[in-house]
Amino acid sequence: MSLDAIHTLAAMFMIDWKVVFDGLLVLPRDVTLLVFSTLTALLMTLARRWFTNQDLLRRCAEDLRQLKRLKQEARQSRDKPKRQRLRNTVALVKQMQLGEDMKVLGVVLVPVAVLAMWAVERLDYLPPRVGDELVIRAFFPISSVDDVTHLVPTEGIELKSSPIQVIHADSRTPPIGMAEWTLCPTSATDELKLTIRHRGESAVHRVTVGRTTYLPPQQVHPNKTTEVVLKRYQPLGLNLKTETLGLPPWMAGYLLLTLLLVPGLKRLLQVS
């Protein structure tokens, strides 16, 4: 399958299902994650049932159980040549299983990738609510350090800090300038526009308030980047600290739940 065909299938899948999945966001985030993981596990299980040779996989599973017993007997009798022959046979059986597993991977790759794209945009952070304190930051070239920048007061927010801020050096690499403001949204809206001015230029950062979804926390503008600091979604309120592994907390919970659900669904649906 060509890359263009994969993109087309992904686009079709997203058009058909994005609104449906957005409806899950009215549920508590932990319930949404559970439903999302269950749908993924069900998709993988059904793909295994429909696109693999179930008779072959059942015979492979039976052979592996028998080979395990024979290996235990050979270990007890200290028959090294027999153990080596059994290991070779096990490798051949697992190679046949791997061929069937690759069929499942080929079938679920596109839909699971599209589901993951949706989840990255929806489950990484918690949407801001009315009354929540929000921190908005603006990042500038290092040449702007010690200049002033201005957040324009607008309807729908209560500023908790001065609208005029001095840009200071940030300890990032490479070094940049940064200013930040604290504000409190006072009403729900699909698009709260926060305007930041500096050196005669304006950047508008858009935020949704009181909705089930959120706009990208970081937005790029000419000569600057703006960011609203949103709370990360932590499954079950646990601080998993998976960012050091390159995984957002929701993804760690999603992978764990999916891996736990697949064996149960395979037994329930009698899938090998």
Image: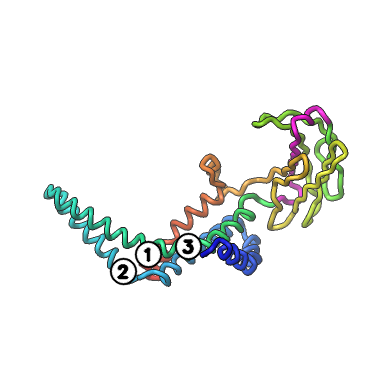
Image vertical order of residue 21 relative to residue 81, above or below:
below
Q: Are marks 2 and 1 in contact (CB under 8 Å)?
A: yes
- Left of 261 or right of it: where is 164? right
* Colouring scheme applied when the structure was drawn: rainbow
Query: Mark 2, residues whose alpha carbon is within 10 Å: few (<14), some, or many (≥20)?
Result: some
Residue 199 visible in this rendered orientation of the protein: yes
Q: What element does badge 2 sit on?
A: helix
Three-letter residue code for mark 2:
Leu
Three-letter residue code for mark 3:
Ala
Q: Which residue is mark 2?
A: 56
Image vertical order of residue 15 relative to residue 141, above or below:
below
In the picture, residue 118 is in which quadrant?
Answer: bottom right
Q: What range is drawn magenta here?
A: 128-147
Residue found 64% across the figure and 54% down from its top: 121
Instruction: Point out which mark residue 100 bears.
Output: 1
Q: Which residue is mark 3?
A: 41
Pick whichever of labels 2 and 1 is earlier in the sequence: 2
Pick whichever of labels 3 and 1 is earlier in the sequence: 3
Query: Mark 3, residues whose alpha carbon is within 10 Å: few (<14), some, or many (≥20)?
Result: many
Residue 58 in magenta? no
